[in-house]
């Protein structure tokens, strides 16, 4: 799993430079969101503490500028596509409740990040 994480981090470091004009890149988003993937694809019954703390970091990152939510959304969408990870809709909906957090960025199965 750590090798997969390292490969994905490098991939998003490269992709992040193309995403845009923000003070972070997709590798930072991946670092904070990857701990949630096992919950979102139903490999764990509850989100890990690292998942919930990572979502709090992403919420703060989303507030850096007005493109923050869109960039985070796009990074999460790219991550799902790259990992071929089919997020389960009910898990996406329960993530906010399970982590006691209100998202400043969207997460869904069919995200439309450019409508934000």
Image: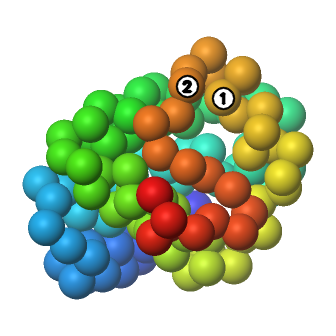
The part of the image, by quadrant, that contains residue 48 is top right
Is 37 placed above or below 85 here? Answer: above
Where is residue 73 drawn, in percent x and y?
A: 47, 59
Taking the spot 77% from the left edge, 39% from the top edge, the residue there is 93
The part of the image, by quadrant, that contains residue 75 is bottom left
Judging by the rendered image, the residue that carries numbered circle 2 is 102
For label 2, count other residues whose C-alpha is less than 10 Å away and answer few (under 14), some (14-19) or many (20+): few
| Viewer-proximal residue among 67 and 72 | 67
Q: Which mark is residue 48?
A: none
Q: How many marks?
A: 2
Where is residue 57 drawn, in percent x and y?
A: 35, 33
Q: Earlier in the sequence, mark 1 or mark 2?
A: 1
Describe residue 10's horizontal placement relative to residue 111 as left or right. left
Judging by the rendered image, the residue that carries numbered circle 1 is 96
| Viewer-proximal residue among 76 and 11 | 76
Residue 2 seen anywhere in this rendered image of the structure? no
Describe residue 7's horizontal placement relative to residue 61 as left or right. right
Where is residue 63 drawn, in percent x and y?
A: 26, 36
Taking the spot 38% from the left edge, 51% from the top edge, the residue there is 69
């Amino acid at each position: 799993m750590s090798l997969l994480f390292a490969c994905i981090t490098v991939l998003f470091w490269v992709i992040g430079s193309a995403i845009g004009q923000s003070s972070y890149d997709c590798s930072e988003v991946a670092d904070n969101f990857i701990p949630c993937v096992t919950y979102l694809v139903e490999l764990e019954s509850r989100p890990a503490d690292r998942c919930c703390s990572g979502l709090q970091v992403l919420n703060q990152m989303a507030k850096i500028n007005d493109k923050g939510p869109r960039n985070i959304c796009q990074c999460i969408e790219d991550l799902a596509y790259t990992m071929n990870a089919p997020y389960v809709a009910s898990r996406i909906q329960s993530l906010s409740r399970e982590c006691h957090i209100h998202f400043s960025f969207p997460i869904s199965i069919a995200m439309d990040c450019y409508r934000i």
